[in-house]
Image (cartoon, rainbow, N blue to C red):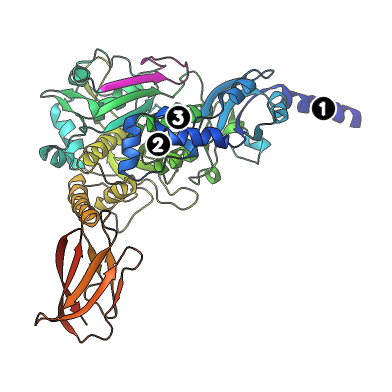
């Protein structure tokens, strides 16, 4: 009996090493000389549009932007039994498929620093939820809808206010990640987009070809909610933005490789200067249940998707992500919707009521998710043939919002992504009382616009003018310097016009002690670059 048990154990162990596995292979740190050369000439690793966006938002170009070592990738690809499926410069890793034994052998390569298996039992224990059709809700299409329904989803979040004020996404680059966009080159909903050369490119990261068709038409529907335009019938939320279309969803399998494809597409988007991305895809259950994400994995930091989303946000983009449609199953938002770097969108109906299928929060680290809500039940969309229909799913709440983000950002393109995203949250109707179902609630992009315009004026003033604070003051006046000034002369006058203080100031010596002055009103005068500006100061 013991011998039989031993043989069985050996047989099972052998099987585990013979079956095909997926894993993330982390490489050694990038060569400092290569990194230095690339950072000295950033146009060699990204477009001018990307450089301009990063400069405008003070986003650092760093070693993460430098491509990973292709020679090392090729060596991994040439290793026995290994297929490279995707790569990530941000994670400095490649996603591979092969037997566990062959993957483990990659540690023999001197430049491989770590292996992270998709089967978490090789890393840590995990649970199991069953695989299901992720597009089950979205594929429940309705008959043709009239323009009024498109109006409802637009007016619900007050995007029409942006359009009325001329902010419709112009000069903002947007990238979509989905399963395919058949008809995008012929669909009448994109005639204006094509005629104005605002369909900038497309790529299939699964097949590694420039192609739009992919393995499905889900992307055709989601894309329409932002970019579609049929005069008198349908208007997307960002009809004047420019778009890239990426295929990252593989309809032939469900595996964490799709997360890796998605991160790679996100990196491509960043290098092209994209501001906003839309992802109407989430990941939790896979064909191989050993790879499933349990709730503890969904802490916004652990999964490949979450790590990519956070890196993309850190690089200056706003990544709009569907919350998911599994409230009746797994329940919680899955990845990359769990990431703090994602603007996660749940679904409401035409009366702004929570819809039964919309996945809820928080993530397992307690971060409020979803962030905001938009229409996801009977949402108006344009199908691949140019017909206006309706469909259900957070897959449509997300692009409705993504287009709105692009329209909003086109009004204040010099403001950073964290400022814009926070303004969207603060505009929502439940911001002061968020819930697990609604997050911060339904946003009002008109309110967000007005708040951001105020912030934009203030930032512009601070960039070009001195600022004095606090005011009223009790003991010390602090002076904020504009970028154009390196030194200045400060003088303070009482109400009789008598000078009571005078000092030379600089960005490093920018404090004035007024503790000995009597209470009352004073006039401060700052002279720099042959220009004098006066300020009223109240001394308490």
**Relative image position of residue 403 (x, y in whole percent):** 25, 34
Magenta residues, start to end: 199-215
Quadrant of the image occupied by residue 230: top left
Left or right relative to 360: residue 231 = left
Q: Residues within 10 Å of mark 1 (few under 14, many from 20)?
A: few
- According to the picture, the residue beneath numbered tag 3 turns out to be 262
394 is higher (above) or lower (below) than 423: above
Q: Residues within 10 Å of mark 2 (few under 14, many from 20)?
A: many
**Residue placed farthest to the front in the image?**
530
**Relative image position of residue 14 (x, y in whole percent):** 77, 24
**Relative image position of residue 101 (x, y in whole percent):** 73, 25
The secondary structure that dominates the magenta segment is: loop
- According to the picture, the residue beneath numbered tag 1 turns out to be 10
Q: Residue at x 18, y 40 (%)?
A: 159
- Tag in front: 3 or 2: 3
Q: Quadrant of the C terminus?
A: bottom left
Please tell me the numbered disc located at residue 355. Answer: none
In magenta segment, residue 211: yes
Q: Callout 2: helix, strand or loop?
A: loop
The answer to which of marks 1 and 2 sits earlier in the sequence is 1
- According to the picture, the residue beneath numbered tag 2 turns out to be 324
- Tag in front: 3 or 1: 3
Spatial separation of the CA atoms under disc 3 and disc 2: 16 Å
**Residue placed farthest to the top in the image?**
186
């Amino acid at each position: 009996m013991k011998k039989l048990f031993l043989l069985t154990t050996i047989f099972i162990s052998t099987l585990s090493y013979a079956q095909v596995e997926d894993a993330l292979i982390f490489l050694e740190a990038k060569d400092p000389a290569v990194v230095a050369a690339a950072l000295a000439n950033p146009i060699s690793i990204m477009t001018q549009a990307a450089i301009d966006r990063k400069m405008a938002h003070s986003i650092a170009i760093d070693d993460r932007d430098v491509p990973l070592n292709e020679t090392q990738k090729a060596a991994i690809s040439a290793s026995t039994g290994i297929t490279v499926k995707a790569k990530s410069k941000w994670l400095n890793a490649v996603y591979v498929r092969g037997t566990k034994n062959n993957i483990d052998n990659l540690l023999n390569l001197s430049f491989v620093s770590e292996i992270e298996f998709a089967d978490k039992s090789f890393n840590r224990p995990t649970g199991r939820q069953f695989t299901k059709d992720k597009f089950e809700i979205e594929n429940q299409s309705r008959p043709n809808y009239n323009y009024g329904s498109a109006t409802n989803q637009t007016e619900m979040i007050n995007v029409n206010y942006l359009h009325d004020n001329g902010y419709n996404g112009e000069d903002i680059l947007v990238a979509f990640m989905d399963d395919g966009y058949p008809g995008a080159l012929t669909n009448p909903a994109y005639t204006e987009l094509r005629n104005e050369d605002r369909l900038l490119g497309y790529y299939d990261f699964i097949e590694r070809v420039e192609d739009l068709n992919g393995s499905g038409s889900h992307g055709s529907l989601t894309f329409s909610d932002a970019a579609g335009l049929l005069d008198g019938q349908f208007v997307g939320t960002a009809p004047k933005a420019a778009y890239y279309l990426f295929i990252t969803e593989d309809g032939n399998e469900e595996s964490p490789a799709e997360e890796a494809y998605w991160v790679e597409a996100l990196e491509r988007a960043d290098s092209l200067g994209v501001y906003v991305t839309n992802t109407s895809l989430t990941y939790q259950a896979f064909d191989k249940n050993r790879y499933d994400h349990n709730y503890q994995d969904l802490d916004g930091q652990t999964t490949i998707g979450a790590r990519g989303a956070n890196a993309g946000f850190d690089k200056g983009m706003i990544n709009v992500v569907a919350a998911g449609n599994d409230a009746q199953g797994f329940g919680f938002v899955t990845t990359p919707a769990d990431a703090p770097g994602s603007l996660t969108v749940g679904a409401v109906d035409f009366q702004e009521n929570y819809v039964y299928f919309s996945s809820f929060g928080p993530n397992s680290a307690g971060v409020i998710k979803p962030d905001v809500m938009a229409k996801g039940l009977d949402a108006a969309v344009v199908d691949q043939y140019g017909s206006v229909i309706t469909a259900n799913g957070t897959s449509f709440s997300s692009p409705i919002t993504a287009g709105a983000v692009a329209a909003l950002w086109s009004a204040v393109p010099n403001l950073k992504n964290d400022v814009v995203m926070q303004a969207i949250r603060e505009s929502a109707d439940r911001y002061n009382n968020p819930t697990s179902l609604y997050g911060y609630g339904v946003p009002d992009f008109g309110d967000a616009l007005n708040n951001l315009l105020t912030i934009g004026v203030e930032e512009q003033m601070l960039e070009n003018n001195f600022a004095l604070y606090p005011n009223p003051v009790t003991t010390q006046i602090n002076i904020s310097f504009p970028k154009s000034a390196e030194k200045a002369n400060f003088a303070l006058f009482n109400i009789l016009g008598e000078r009571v203080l005078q000092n030379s100031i600089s960005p490093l010596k920018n404090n004035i002690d007024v503790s000995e002055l009597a209470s009352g009103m004073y006039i401060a005068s700052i002279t720099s670059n042959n220009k004098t500006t006066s300020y009223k100061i109240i001394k308490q």
